[in-house]
Image: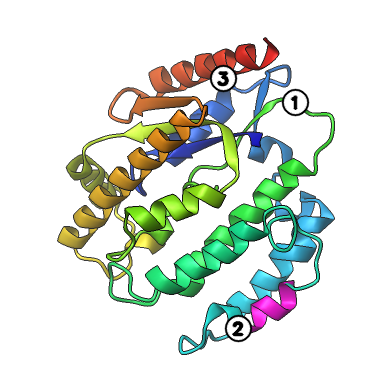
Amino acid sequence: MKHKIVELLGPSGIGKSALYHELRKRWKPNEKWVSFDDIFATPKQFPGTYVRTVFRPLKKAWEEPYDYSRSLKNYNIWDQLDGYSNPFLFGEYGDFFHTVMDLVERHCRVGYSGEDKRFQTFFMIMWSVGQLNTVLELEGDDRLFLMKDGEMLLSRIMHLNSPSFDEDALFAYLKVVPKPEALIRLVAPADQVVKRIKKRGRVASLHLGMDDETIYKYTSNTLEMLAKACEELKEKGVPVLEVDAEKEIKENAQHIIEFFEEVMEVNRV
């Protein structure tokens, strides 16, 4: 089952945030698409299910020291989440949740920086689950939802990506991840993305502890993994638009809006 969401995909530093905000500037109330931030500006506006099942437990867990010697399945966040009504945890998408737990345990103990990334990755994926769940709870709204840049489930391949995260792990994730209505993949050479990262003068959480050579390797692998993911989903009927991230942002934004119209037109047929 596909959901009426659109993801912006690309490695950290490729320009997803700038493009997302450019699209928001162009949005009008009568559009057939809408951005997540135009509906839910702050967590206080999220439906109760999101706050109850994800935001509060994760916030509490984030504030506590994480014992990296323990499995995520034994960590207290599991007990906090247990029993809540959320289709991604214990209902329709239960396979997703347990597959993710397994992949995180197996592939995020040692990230590209050499650090244990299990809790960070799990936190980010569950944050995405909460955002998607807010959209699923909306009734009577048939617009396309452009999700926040880099904050949806396919984008979390960036966090799952590690020296041990291989093609088998990628396809295991794709097998259970909810399919979006459409995808927009930003494309640029890895060396150009690294140049952007260095130019902006701040280190993203994904890059902490990495030197330039490692960032390049991580970025190259992320680009490859996202390309394979898009190819797989395209074969399953998900429209994919590839955008050259080195082109003018206004040109890319217009191209994307035209893509939205094409996707909606197909849905009406």
150 left or right of 179? left
Q: CA distance from mark 3 to mark 2?
A: 41 Å
The residue under label 2 is which amino acid type?
Tyr
N-term-proximal mark, 1 vs 3: 1
Nearer to the camera, 199 or 228: 228
Q: CA distance from mark 1 to mark 3?
A: 13 Å
Tell me the residue that label 2 is attached to. 75
Q: Is residue 46 magenta?
A: no
* Residue in the picture at 33% in, 47% down: 225
Provide the residue span drawn in magenta.
75-81
The residue under label 1 is which amino acid type?
Asp
**Res 89 → quadrant:** bottom right
The residue under label 3 is which amino acid type?
Phe
Marks 1 and 2 close (CB-CB < 8 Å)? no
The quadrant the N terminus occupies is top right
N-term-proximal mark, 1 vs 2: 2
Asked which secondary structure carries label 1, the reply is loop
* Residue in the picture at 66% in, 83% down: 76
N-term-proximal mark, 3 vs 2: 2
Asked which secondary structure carries label 3, the reply is helix
Marks 1 and 3 close (CB-CB < 8 Å)? no
Residue 38, x across and y down, in percent: 68, 35
* Residue in the picture at 28% in, 75% down: 114
Tell me the residue that label 3 is attached to. 260
Tell me the residue that label 1 is attached to. 142
Nearer to the camera, 93 or 189: 93
The quadrant the C terminus occupies is top right
* Residue in the picture at 26% in, 56% down: 218
